[in-house]
Image: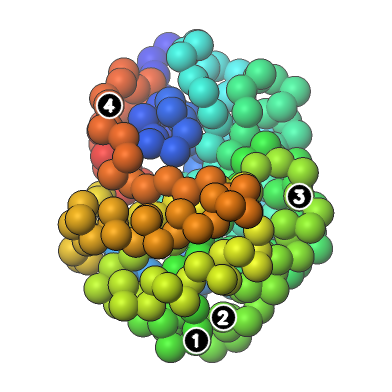
Amino acid sequence: MSSSNNFKYLYGPVHSWRLGNSLGVDLLSQKEKKCNFDCAYCQIGKTVEYCTDRQVFVDTEKILNEIRNIKNKNIDYITLSGRGEPTLAKNLGEVISGIKNLRKEKIAVITNSTLLNDESVKNDLSLSDVVMAKFDACNDDVLKKINNPPSNINFKDILNGLYSFRKIFKGLLKIQVMFTCDNVSLYKEMVPLVEHINPDEVEVNTPLRPSDTKPLDKNKIKEIKKYFMVLEEKKIKVVSVYDKEREKINVVTDRNILIRRGKEV
Ligand code: SF4
């Protein structure tokens, strides 16, 4: 590959406050976002049509070919996310195994947690080192307001999926709670639910990247984090999006690709 701009399915690395230097892999790579959520704060815009069935969007070999051409050594994680929900990609497990054969970096997957009751999704995710799972709601009304799923996705299934996945997953499970004006008043109700899931870490987040949703200010996030700190007694680490100043690093793919995928540099 002659130029870094030839990458079609890789983007970054971007500096992530959660993972350090993270090289992104987009298993979906379609013009339209492929997701079964329509989050109010989504950086890549509205979901035009829900995608609910797992399918292969990009051949595994095409992705692995690009992975073979990475020259950059300054990468902490290879992160599977992209334009939508990566667990919708039926070849998720195959891609993770393929990357592990080629690279030494740890693999993270960012998921919206909707498919964790599906055995094949659980098995695929179990091959990764870190799973970062979205959990923004404490009931169906809040789920509707923030994540706006289709009618066959409900709060209870998401909670049960996370709980059962935790039981089998040997890697690091990080729960990410995005706080906005739609769920901020309910933050105390989130704490026992997170305790029930029993992740390794919970991230108190608010949308700092460009979207239609206004982020909560530092003081509010500090207050929420303080309340969540009770979880540290249960060995659940608590971090917040404002904990670390964001750094800029060199990228291997061009800036337009990052912008298209809703990533800031
Ligand atoms: S789950 Fe992610 S990609 Fe899907 S709508 Fe929400 S923020 Fe956007």
Residue placed under numbered mark 2 in the picture? 155
Question: Mark 2 or 4 closer to N-term?
Answer: 2
Q: What element carries label 4?
A: loop
The residue tagged 4 is 247
Q: Which amino acid does label 3 sit on?
A: Phe
Picture quarter with the C terminus: top left
On the rendered structure, is 222 left or right of 21?
Answer: left
Mark 2 to mark 3: distance in Å?
21 Å
Q: In this view, does 12 lie above or below 50?
A: above
The alpha-carbon separation of the residues under discs 3 and 4 comes to 31 Å
Give the x, y percent position of residue 110. 53, 49
On screen, 98 above or below 236? above
Return the residue at label 3. 169
Q: How far apart are marks 1 and 2 (CA)?
A: 5 Å
| Amino acid under disc 4 | Glu
Pick whichever, 239 or 70, lies toward us: 239
Per the image, label 3 sits on a secondary structure element best described as loop
Query: Where does label 1 land, which residue?
Result: 140
**Residue labelled 3 has its Cβ within 8 Å of some atom of ligand 1:** no
Q: How far is disc 1 from disc 3 in space, using C-alphas?
A: 26 Å
